[in-house]
Amino acid sequence: MQTSQTDKVHGVNSAKIESLINDPHRLIALNAVHNFRDLGGYPTISGQTTKWRTLFRADGLYRLTPDDAQAVIDLGVKTVIDLRTDNEVKTRGTFPVDKFPVAFHHLSIIDATWNDGDTPVIEDTVEFLVWAYREMIANAAPKFANAIEVIAATDVLPLVFHCAAGKDRTGVLAAFILSILGVPDEIISADYGLTELGMKRLIKWAEVSQPDLAAAYANMPARFAAADPRAMAIILDDLNTKHGSVKNFVREIGVSDKTANTLRESLLTN
């Protein structure tokens, strides 16, 4: 029997989570970007629900075809946050801001992307991802806070934030935002786990359309491309244990209560 991503998440009815994350409105089908997802439709502990067509997460928007970019604009997107490094932006490019009217923010989360020689030898996928996200959060907390402030600014929505694969930097930021909104940890972890399917779509596309990218993934340790929801569950549990809640943690790193309240007002519906 095949194991689904939500079978790895505990505490909430797995069938309910499966239904939520696989809502047909969630994945935005594009030609050259494969992990563009709507963060709407998730229930919160307050009884509200995250709004559809308001906040999106994605992978490398520099790959958008003209038709893809128009589809993003047709969603109403006003703002793009690019979380990639300076070098990634320089070598790969960005969302086509010269042709499509969006407010563009380059908010680099890390200084350099992972290199196999620069990471510890951790063969277990979950252990590796937990190590990586702990390091990222420890070293880049103020940068995540800055991105959250941008998302809470006036007249920026609908908004999409992205990195290269839409997995690590994007996944941690999405977890912080959804936690502020009151989405249960189990759903946050399952949403993160959807990225593994997006990675498979991306790699399959690259094999035909972008051989250099396909080669890079082929030479990469498998754990670098993984998105096991158990890793995100451990990270959230870490923050809950050490700080009382993820909401407390984001407050400690500089996200004001006013900002958190603005996010809830902007991104939740009854």
Image (cartoon, rainbow, N blue to C red):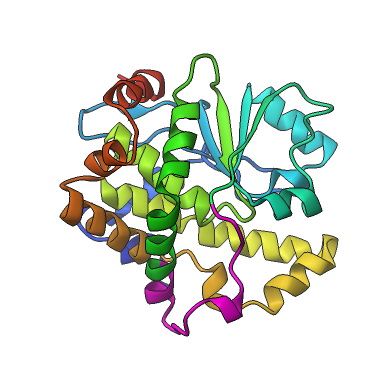
Quadrant for the C terminus, please: top left
Residue 195: x and y, percent? 52, 56
Quadrant for the N terminus, please: bottom left
- Using the rendered image of the protein, determine whether residue 43 is visible from the camera's viewpoint: no
Specify start and end residues of the magenta stretch as a single range.
110-129
Q: Is residue 28 magenta?
A: no
Q: Count the labels in the image.
A: 0
Residue occupying the point 40% across, 19% down = 266
Horizontal side of 253 relative to 225 (left or right) equals left
- Using the rendered image of the protein, determine whether residue 266 is visible from the camera's viewpoint: yes
Residue 58: x and y, percent? 59, 45
| Rendered image quadrant of residue 56 | top right
| Rendered image quadrant of residue 214 | bottom right
**Image position of 199 with respect to 76: above or below:** below
**Image position of 15 with respect to 228: above or below:** above
Q: Is residue 116 magenta?
A: yes
Horizontal side of 193 relative to 185 (left or right) equals right
